[in-house]
Image (cartoon, rainbow, N blue to C red):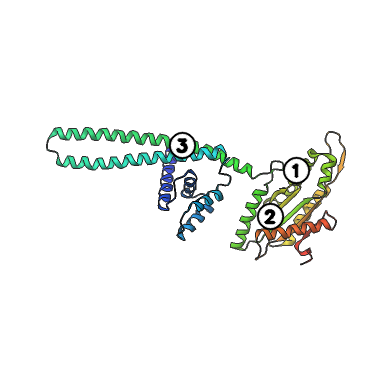
Amino acid sequence: MAMIQQDSARTEAIAKSAASLMSEADVPPTPQNYRVWFEYALGENEDLVADVEERLQRGESFTAAMNAQLYSTYFPGGDGGSSRAEDETQRILKDILGELLSTSGFASDYGEKLEAYAQRLREARRVSDIHSIIGNLVEDTTKMSESSRRLRARLEESTAQAENLRQELQKTKQEALVDALTGLSNRRAFDIKVRETHEEFQRSGSLFCVLMVDVDHFKAFNDNYGHRVGDAVLQVVAAILKETVGNDGYAARYGGEEFVLLIRTPSISQACAMAERARRRFAAKRFKIAKTGKNIGKITASVGVALVKAEDTVASVVERADKALYLAKELGRNSVKSERDLPQA
């Protein structure tokens, strides 16, 4: 119970802080805007906090367009068609804010009444006047106590609901970033990860390589043996890539039979060696159809590798890895090529 009360008090404090910050920044109290400022007051989303504080320091006005940009940036997919958890979270936050504003108003009135009662007591000359003042004071105090209890109960209930929905929303967001077939991160997740990795490189100089991996002749493989077998092949490829990078890298399904890896290394040779290990494991794997036992041979893959440079954008380093991949395919497939093999290098 003590923990619930602490959580409720914290939620109340954060909600009040968010409402106050919105008022100071002249931000309209819409559900979307309140969600942004509640998360900002919560302080757990470091990117959002840094973004808002930078705008505040520059003295920017929080226009409708800016508010919409903040919401779409940090809560993608939050507009029409959003999940039940999104809608319910907004409803809970609005209810909590309403309760807080209502109780705060009552508390303000109560404070004014106390001052008035104190003045009346100082001026009272008869015992009957004092009894009357005390009676009114007890009545108002009882109302204030009941209002506080209702608020506390509402906050406890809302805190529990919000936590359940937060977990549901987190699960939904995680699922939206995972490729259902292979269990790897999907293209959307990779785009986020490579952008973060590139930003870190710009801040600290921490080098990384991008590896583009493509399964050779996969369309023909699918056409010959069917999509179920093709899906099984992609799952094996994904497992090998995940094992190969381990804790030193990041693997994602880029689309179709194409995969992408991020390796934190200052050495393109090291990244190529890792790609070569994966390529050999692919080529050594033999497949057969489970039902019939028919041997369907092996699969191979081509890999392109690029190392980030000072002048690179995310798009340019990925593009070089993609060009190296196509060079590997043009030169016969089942090989690893890097940007050092490109003609212009």
Q: Residue at x 55, y 49 (%)?
A: 74
Residue 51 vertical placement versus 220 (above, below)? below
Q: Amino acid at mark 2?
A: Leu
Name the front one of labels 2 and 3.
3
Question: For mark 3, what is the residue?
Answer: 158
Q: Amino acid at mark 1?
A: Gln
Total numbered badges shown on the rendered structure: 3
Q: Earlier in the sequence, mark 1 or mark 3?
A: 3
Location of residue 262 in the rendering, given as x and y in whole percent from the top left corner: 68, 55
User: Helix, strand, or loop for circle 3?
Assistant: helix
Residue 235's disc number: 1
Quick one: 228 or 246, which is closer to the camera? 228
Q: Is residue 45 visible?
A: no
Location of residue 174 in the rendering, given as x and y in whole percent from the top left corner: 61, 43
Question: For mark 2, what is the residue?
Answer: 262
Q: Is residue 55 left or right of residue 243?
A: left
